[in-house]
Amino acid sequence: MTKLTLAFVSFAVLVVPMDGQSPPSIQGVWRNVERTIPASTTPGARVDPFAHIPPGTQTDVQPGLLIFTARHYSRTTDTAAEPRPTSAYATPDKPTLTELQARWGPFAANAGIYEVSGSTLTLRVLVAKNPAEQRGETVARLTIKVDGNYLWLTPFENNAGPIAAGVTSKYVRVE
């Protein structure tokens, strides 16, 4: 009986801490390295803000950073398929709508508070490039996967409802 008790206690000491381990933390600074845009299987499915990019996996993504502290996050992402123009406007100090859109349109930025529950990340926007998102009611829900220094996020719901064709973004931890 003593050997059986000793074996059980030894097993419990080894196994219980593994079960009780918390999932890997997302706190830190992450740089986007890949984006997978699904082919929409639902007519009219929203894949914003990447609707202008054809389906598939991109490994030559434009720069972006995602920062998580203990409770807050900040995201800035260049969502263009190719580098945005850096040349001067055709008419200095009088950019056309097309020139402005090429520089400022494919860019997403927001910050706020977040919470993680299981494999779901909930973002509550406090400040954003799009002022309509700053009302304090904007929420996005994403599936989250962490494996070592890699993080994958796929949005599945926001204030407008379910997202049928969420774009999966892969990040690498840089800090």
Image (cartoon, rainbow, N blue to C red):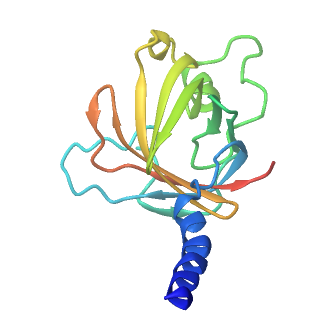
Query: Front-most of 69 and 15?
Result: 15
Position of residue 95 measured from the top left corner of the image (x, y, whole percent): 66, 17
Classify 128 as above or below 39.
above
* Left or right, residue 117 beside residue 175: left
* Residue 89 at x, y percent in the picture: 73, 23
Q: How far across and how far down the image is residue 36, in percent? A: 48, 59
Q: Report the residue at 62% width, 55% height from top.
A: 24
Seen as rendered, the residue at the extreme left is 43
Nearer to me, 4 or 56: 4
The count of marks equals 0
In the image, is 45 to the left or to the right of 12?
left
Q: Residue furthest front?
A: 1
* Residue drawn where x is 67% and y is 48% of the image: 62
Q: State the residue in front, 147 or 53.
A: 147
Relative height, residue 43 to residue 95 (above, below): below
Rendered location of residue 135, percent (x, y): 45, 9
In depth, the one of 108 and 69 nearer the eye is 69
What residue is shown at x 60% (from left), y 79% (from top)? 10
- Indicate whether 137 appears above or below 148: above
Q: Residue at x 63, y 38 (%)?
A: 77
